[in-house]
Amino acid sequence: MDLSKFNRRKYTDYKTPIEYLANLSKILACNVYIKRDDLLGLAAGGNKTRKLEFLMADAMNKNCDSIITCGAVQSNHCRLTLAAAKKENMACHLVLEERVPNSYNPKANGNNFLFRLLGVDGISLVEKGANMADEMQKVADALAEKGKKPYIIPGGGSNEIGSLGYVACAQELYQQMYESKLHFDAIYLASGSGGTHSGLLVGLRDIGVETPLFGISVNRNKDEQKKVISDLCEKIISFHKLPVKLSPEDIIIDDKFVGRGYSYPTEGMVEAVQTLAREEAILLDPTYTGKAMAGMLGHIRSNKYTKEENILFLHTGGAPALYSIPEVIINGVGVDRL
Ligand SMILES: *Cc1c(COP(=O)(O)O)cnc(C)c1O
C-alpha cells in the first residue's frame, strides 16, 4: 500500500528499535525480540501515537479545532490524543467510561494525572455500557453551538484512518527485517479495540509477509474479538481498495489471559510485568502488554516453539498506568486495586 498519498503528521523521528531480549531468551529457550513501540513520540509514547499521525492530519485537513475522544478512566489513548491535540494547538475533550464501577478517582495517579498535567479541556464521566458514540456526539454538539469545529476520534483511534498507523508499522517492520536479516516465526500483541491488530495484519499480508500474528485479547471473548478484528480488516481493505485477501486462519485470538475482565489485574499479568522489569528492565503495563506478555510466556512455556525460532513481541506502551496500582504490581492481585 502506498501510504505517501495520505495526509500525515509526524510524531516520531525514528523507527522504533527491535531489541533482542537475551536474559528472557535464555530462560525460555527460544529467541525473543521486542519492538519498542512504547518509545514512540508524544507524552510517554505507545501505539496510539502511530494512529494519531493519520487521525490528526485528517482533523487538520478538515479545519477542525477541537478533538473529542473516549476511553476508560486510565486510558492511554486519551492521554496520547490529548498530547497530540496540545501539540497541534487544539482543544481536547475526553469522555471517560467507568468500566469498573467506582473506578474513577479525579486525583488518581497514572494517566489520570497526565490528563490534568497536559491540560485537558473537559472530562465527562459516563457509566459502564453507555453509548460512547452518542456521548461524544453530545459533547461535539455543545462545542458546535459555541462556534467550535469538533472532530471525533473513536475509542482507541481504531477506524479505517487510525489503523493506517499500523499498516505503516508493518512496512517499517518489514524494512527492519530486511536490513537485519531477521525472520520471525510468530508475532504477539495485545488485541483491544483492534486497530493495531487489524492494521498490522492487513499491512503485513499486503507486502507478502505471512508470519502468524497472535492477538491476546484484553477484553472480549475469542469469538467476539475475532469478529471485531475481521470487521475492521474488511473495512480497511474495502475503504482503501487493497488487493488483500485474508483467510479465517489469519485472525488468531487467545482469550485465556483476560481474567475477570478489562483492566482487572491477573496473577499472570503481575508475573509478566515483574519478569520483564527484573530480567530486561522493560516496563510493561497492567491492562494490555502485561496480559499480552503473560499470553506469550504461556505459549512459549507450553513448548510451542523450538530454540531456533524467533518470536517478536510488539510492545504497545502503557507504562504510566503502572503508577495507578503500585501495590498490586509489587505484591500481587490479593491487594485491592483501587
Ligand atoms: C490501546 C492499547 C492497546 C490495544 O490497541 P488496540 O489498537 O486498541 O487494539 C495495546 N496496548 C496499549 C498500551 C494500549 O494503550
Image (cartoon, helix red, strand yellow):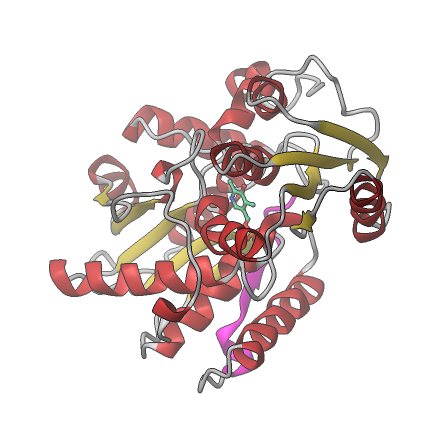
* Magenta region: 246-259
User: Quadrant of the rendered structure where residue 67 is?
Assistant: top right
Residue 68 at x, y percent in the picture: 69, 42
Q: Decide: is 248 above or below 330.
A: below
Residue 4 at x, y percent in the picture: 34, 68
Residue at (43% x, 26% y) in the render = 274
User: Is 30 contained in the magenta span?
Assistant: no
Asked whether residue 304 appears in the rendered view, the answer is no
Q: Decide: is 203 above or below 254.
A: below
Residue at (58% x, 25% y) in the render = 111
Q: Decide: is 76 above or below 251.
A: above
Asked whether residue 126 appears in the rendered view, the answer is yes
Residue toward you, 240 or 145: 145
Q: Quadrant of the N terminus?
A: bottom left
Residue 37 at x, y percent in the picture: 37, 44
User: Is 252 contained in the magenta span?
Assistant: yes
